[in-house]
Image (cartoon, rainbow, N blue to C red):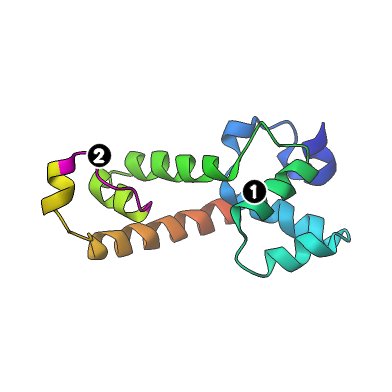
Amino acid sequence: MLERVVFPSIGSMPVREITPTHVLDILQKTAKRGAPTVAAEARRTMSAASLRQTLKVLGWSGAYSPHATRTSGSTRLNEMGYRPDAIEAQLAHADQNNVRRTYNHATYFDERRAMMQEWADKLDEWKGQAQA
């Protein structure tokens, strides 16, 4: 299985259970194995196209996409109890209700800041678990 070759600790983990931390760890492992373009991209903010190409090289195209990361994030944040308005604002989604979109210009900034801090803490927790 490709996952064992690229990142042995994943083993035969189903793709739906792979967290963003797993993807970052895979990118770091790939970079150490001599993939200079991946290493260069991993040091900068990656575009969706760069991540798509990396997933293609790893043999994951069709099974996982950059947008799936946003989907996973939204799902987890909803499960963590954050309000949908704050999550949608963080994802830069426009309100589907035309009247509400016209009158509501709230940014939910304080709630989003707390939400992103908790999300960062969660990523650190997952990374620690993956390294254990």
Tell me the number on the disc at residue 5. none
Which residue ends up furthest to the right in the rendered image? Answer: 34
Disc on the earlier residue, 2 or 1: 1
Q: Where does label 2 land, which residue?
A: 96
Amino acid bearing label 1: His
Taking depth in this image into account, of 57 and 8 the one nearest to the observer is: 57
Q: Where does label 1 land, which residue?
A: 22
Disc 2 secondary structure class:
loop
- Report which quarter residue 110 is drawn in: bottom left
Type of secondary structure dominating the magenta stretch: loop
- Would you say 70 lies left or right of 101 here? right
- Mark 2, mark 1: which one is toward the viewer? 2
Q: Residue at x 65, y 55 (%)?
A: 24
Q: Is residue 75 above or below residue 132?
A: above
Taking the image as drawn, is residue 131 in sight? no
Q: Residue at x 69, y 64 (%)?
A: 42
Question: Callout 1: 10 Å neighbours few (<14), some, many (20+)?
Answer: some
Taking the image as drawn, is residue 62 in sight? yes
Question: Callout 2: 10 Å neighbours few (<14), some, many (20+)?
Answer: few
Taking depth in this image into account, of 73 and 81 the one nearest to the observer is: 73
| Magenta run includes residue 12 | no
Q: How many numbered circles are shown?
A: 2
**Which residue range is magenta in the image?**
91-98
Amino acid bearing label 2: Gln
